[in-house]
Image (spheres, rainbow, N blue to C red):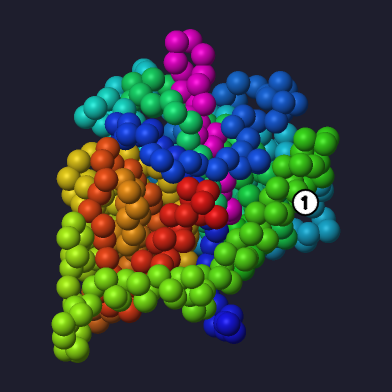
Amino acid sequence: MLRSMLGARKCWGLVRVRNSMEVTAKVSPITLATSSRRHYSPPTHIKQSAVANESGTMAQIKQEMMTRLGLEPGYNPLPKSREHLLKYQPKLEDLPARAMQDSFTSAIIPLSTDRTLQDKYVTYLGSVRMGRLLEDMDMFAAWCCHKHLKLPSLPEGVHLPYTFVTILVDRIDFTNVLASGTQDIRLSGHVSWVGTSSIEVVVWLEQLVGGSYQKLTRALFLMAARNATNTAAAPVNPIKPANEEEKVILAGGADRKKQRQILCAQSVFKVEPNDPEQTLMYELYKRTTPSNTLELNKRILPPNCRWMEDSYQMSTIPSFPEHRNHHNRVFGGFLMRSALEISWAAAFLYCKTRPKLEHISDISFEKPVGVDSFIKMTAYVVYTKLNYVQIMTVADVLDTHTGNQVTTNTFYYTFSAPDTVTEVLPRSYHETMWYIQGRRKFEASMGLK
């Protein structure tokens, strides 16, 4: 069947997460696939040569980044101009190649000693708020980009003529260690692939347990390098692998880029569903249409099912300067935390029991969000399977004068419950497209295709 691939807007890659944030659900009959390129630890040669926690705490990293960029504490509605830095923007051919070990660094979230910090990170069960860690990982990925840059022609004392923004989070994998809200957490990472102006960063989280660090999670962030005023792309140092291990990691980054492009082109929001999916759509129609009448739009809800239109949670969040990044836009980590928490609430209320977060897919940043924005977060249950619930969360920015809204972010989450959940069903064609998209995300994140 011929499928059009025109009119594709930008879309970003796949995020895969398995999280032990919540209480453990019953063992599922669905078996997870394991990727051949999930590096839960830094490459051996990097790890052996690294200085432990060389970047200090996350608070110190934030301060150091502000110093490098020439920013000062305090909010100013009209940020200090950085146009004078444009003349220091280097050309690609002037940038020396870098190895992955050049950008490797690590830092600590000191939860064991900072009681005030504990209050921000801990859940009432004593575990860690996953949303808070996403915020830190986003900032740490930007810090790794700073470490990767080497500008030989930049005069001493001149601030960094760059801006870094998050494009997407391409995958997050979790181990089975349940993170505590009262023990130190270490972040480590390095640049793993670069394009002309795009940078892939791999980030690990580990927690101190019984005197040694246990692996918690690993994530891939795709960042964009922009000029000093965030008005155009900026070139970055290429990568020259230091050994065979780095060559393998670099090749993996190129493979992931190709896979993202394929997934983009096949999105159900861009091309029609494939033949098996169209068969599924017809089966859904037959299940929800009465056989004793041809009345238009007459639908029936099968037993132990729930309409998608009745299965969502929504919250409108006013943003404040507290939530801004270094460029007076809403911090991407804040959006990730807000989306995760409302999605968890939606899953909890749908399942009527505490769910366990299994995966996150498609953390994409399509448009910047101003610090004066109203952000509407809506979490929809779009697909269910056995004891799994697939959530699609949409972030829209509301225009307070016209009432119009523009979608800036989309997120897909997979949660599991202890028992089989109520099946969600679409009622309209539009909802059926969401159902198909949710099914695709669920099967991809669980390794079923």
Instruction: Look at the picture and state if 444 lies above or below 209.
Output: below
Q: In this rendering, is residue 54 above or below 346?
A: above
Which is nearer the eye, 156 or 7? 7
* Residue at 20%, 41% in the rendered image: 353
Disc 1, SS = loop
Q: Position of residue 446 (x, y in %)?
A: 48, 48
- Choose top left, top right, bottom left or bottom right for residue 98: top right
Q: x, y percentage for residue 402?
A: 24, 82
Residue 400 in the magenta stretch? The answer is no
Q: Quadrant of the N terminus?
A: bottom right
Residue at 16% across, 86% down: 293
Q: How many marks?
A: 1
Q: Determine whether 427 is above or below 39 in the image.
A: below
Q: Is residue 205 magenta?
A: yes
What is the residue that sits farthest to the front in this orientation?
A: 292
In this picture, residue 395 sits left or right of residue 267: left
Q: Which residue is mark 1?
A: 238
Task: Confirm whether residue 321 shows in the render.
Answer: no
Quarter of the figure with residue 127: top left
- Residue range highlighted in magenta: 204-223
Side (left or right) of 38 relative to 125 = right
Question: Between 377 and 317, which is closer to the camera in this rendering?
Answer: 377
Residue at image location 37% in from the left, 76% down from the top: 282
The x and y percentages for residue 30 are 44, 43
Amino acid beneath label 1: Pro
User: What residue appears at the point 33 percent right and 79 percent down from the top-left corner?
Assistant: 429
Give the prevailing secondary structure in the magenta stretch. Answer: strand
Q: Determine the residue located farthest toward the top in the rendered image.
A: 211
